[in-house]
Amino acid sequence: MALMNYMCAQGIDSRGKTMGHGTNFINTAHLSRGRISLKRGNLFGQTPAKRRRLQTPHLQENADAQIGFLLRKQLTLYSVSPLYKFSYDRLQEYSRQLGFVIAAEKQKGLAVHVEGDLKFKVKFSSLSVLKTSEQDQAGVLIQVTAENAGPKVVWTGCFCCTRGDDILETVVEDFTCLPLFLVNGAESLSAIIGTWLQQTFDCSFSMLTISPLNLAWMAAMWTGYKMERHKGAVELTFSVPGTPQPLDISYAIHAEDAKALWDSIHATQHEVRQEQVDLFMDSLCYHFYRHFKIYLAATRLVKVSTFVASAHADGKIKILHSAYLLEILALMTELAISKIL
């Protein structure tokens, strides 16, 4: 099997430039006052021996227009503690309040570094399309639009708790748990909006970084997703430690070959086991060693790119297909909850 398509070593920073560093999303408000009761099972942060494939429903027929902002865009991930006194009935009020704050910051000449003299409009909206059951909380979309530029959406944020009913047992009264926050937009607006959210809802944001173990799970699970055609390549990026300059190794495998390898390993239909993930990665690493005599076990997996989605250790993802959107968001929700335990 011609598993390996190409390999290249590049002297680039494996961390890249992460949207969110230097913004006020992190640690500008103290942790929320409530406690969450969590089932301590199957969380990526606790290295599960196995996890069940999520039997999520298909998106609604009219969903594409609602979830387009989540597709084919780089999204930065945050975990969020429970929101205090948040209400779905007050979304219009939140829109006005945040709009006033952004306008005031812009008038003061602070932090709103965008092209031109733009007038911003803020809209909060509920996203029931991200629910997988009646127990899930509806997602919350925040969009900032430049009204005199099209209009054009210049910043997007989305709270969600997809498949959270299997993880959360109880949340204390007056708190709403939307543990995953996805962001696309300018850092300057992120700073303003992040500060307002934390002060308004007495919550705390933290960057949702992804460990090499979790990236390996994603590589295996996403490779195994069924698609009509498996185009392109599954690409794994490894960071080489101890070099004078940052050095990455990029290892690409034909998507059909990677899928065939995973299918030969993954015999359990409705669950994925740690030993299966390990065998998948070990097989790829052994194939690489045979060709290049480089032990990838001595490096650190920092990025996974597949035909379904890509993810970086710094907490960036790009979702490429809507068919598995809910499964990917459910996985990220688990990671976010494990971070705030």
Image: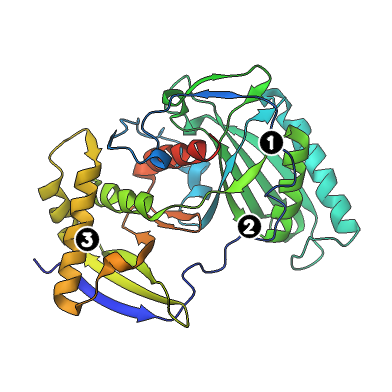
Quadrant of the image occupied by residue 305: bottom left
At 10% across and 49% down in the image, what residue appears? 264
In the rendered image, residue 266, in percent from the top left (x then y), is placed at: 15, 44
Q: Which residue is mark 1?
A: 31
| Rendered position, 7 above or below 45 | below
Contact? badges 1 and 2 (CB < 8 Å): no
- In the rendered structure, the answer to whether residue 140 lies left or right of residue 190 reads left
Q: Nearer the viewer, mark 3 or mark 2?
A: 2
Q: What whole-number distance in Å separates the C-alpha atoms at marks 1 and 2? A: 19 Å
Q: What mark, if any, has residue 20 been given in the picture?
A: 2
- In the rendered structure, the answer to whether residue 137 lies left or right of residue 334 reads right
Residue 227 visible here: no
Q: What whole-number distance in Å separates the C-alpha atoms at marks 3 and 2? A: 32 Å
Of 122 and 14, the residue lying toward us: 14
Quadrant of the image occupied by residue 142: top right
Q: What whole-number distance in Å separates the C-alpha atoms at marks 1 and 3? A: 43 Å
Q: Amino acid at mark 3?
A: Ala
Q: Nearer the viewer, mark 1 or mark 2?
A: 1
Q: Amino acid at mark 1?
A: Leu
Q: What mark, if any, has residue 255 been given in the picture?
A: 3
Q: Residues within 10 Å of mark 2 (few under 14, many from 20)?
A: many
| Rendered position, 140 above or below 104 | above
- Say whether disc 1 or disc 3 marks the residue closer to the N-terminus: 1
At 77% across and 52% down in the image, what residue appears? 120
In the rendered image, residue 22, in percent from the top left (x then y), is placed at: 69, 61
Of 173 and 155, the residue lying toward us: 173
- The image shows a total of numbered marks equal to 3
| Rendered position, 239 above or below 107 | below
